[in-house]
Amino acid sequence: MSKKTDVDLTRLARILAAKARDKRIVVAIAGAPGSGKSTMAEALAAQLTEDLGVTSQVLPMDGFHYDNAVLEPLGLLPRKGAPETFDVAGLASVLTRLGQDAPEDVAVPVFDRSQDLARAGGRIIRADTRVIVLEGNYLLLENRPWAELRSGFDVTVSIQCDISVLRERLLQRWLDHGYVRSEALKKAQDNDLPNAELVTAHNARADFVLTSGATG
């Protein structure tokens, strides 16, 4: 694999536009919870589509969360968002369909945070989409089954973010959901931060690196 290269969004968009000239490509953007990957993915897709004329769409990994009805009997509901609470095989199947570059639309699930559930067919990846920006926490994990997804990626991107920034963002996320500070702190410390540390320690090398700032 090529040595990782630090880039900004504008340079990355130009690189991807060139790669998508002859075929559809899937770009995997991975980062710890709170690293800003969703925001960066949306900004990247917008630059590609609006500035460079390369039709792009975001595919969030969160749509492949197992439902609470599946997680609760397994004792995994408190760990929702951890690697073992996702349908990795389902994501792999969708990537296979998207990678075929077939002349048809593909329906994908989207996570509804207000309802805390994934909606089947919540988004359509159109047949004319040239760049699919897949974003999620665990896309570059080295262990199975996550590592098996890599054959479906044309380009990989890792987001770097200081751990102190992650802590602040993760705490604020739960405060914004209406939790009091003590509850928000517990949720961040018991689940989000361990997941962030896992990503930091066990991600495979990416083709490119984006740095997330203190306010990104």
Image (cartoon, rainbow, N blue to C red):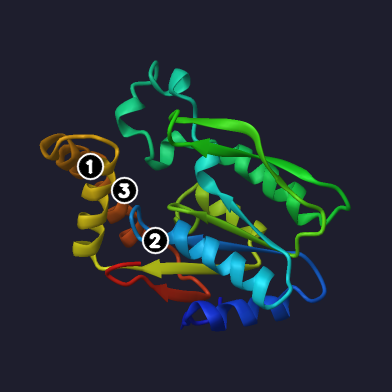
User: Which image quadrant is residue 14 in?
Assistant: bottom right
Marks 1 & 3, CB-CB < 8 Å contact: no
**Mark 2 vs mark 1, CA separation in Å:** 17 Å
- Going by the numbered disc 2, the residue's amino acid type is Gly
Q: Decide which of tag 1 and tag 3 comes sooner along the chain.
A: 1
The numbered disc on residue 175 is 1
Q: Position of residue 37 (x, y in %)?
A: 44, 60
Q: Is 110 above or below relative to 134?
A: above
In this picture, residue 196 sits left or right of residue 9:
left
The numbered disc on residue 195 is 3
Q: In the picture, which quadrant includes the C terminus? A: bottom left
Secondary-structure class at tag 3: helix
User: Badge 2: few (under 14), some or many (20 or more) residues near its Cα, within 10 Å?
Assistant: many
User: Which image quadrant is residue 132 in?
Assistant: bottom right
User: Which image quadrant is residue 2 in?
Assistant: bottom right
Task: State the residue in front, 13 or 88.
Answer: 13
Q: Is 184 above or below relative to 1?
A: above
Which of pointers 2 and 1 indicates the residue nearer the eye? 1
| Residue at position x 80%, y 46% in the image | 105
Q: Decide which of tag 2 and tag 3 comes sooner along the chain.
A: 2
Q: Is 163 above or below relative to 68?
A: below
Q: Position of residue 110 (x, y in %)?
A: 57, 39
In this picture, residue 11 sits left or right of residue 31:
right
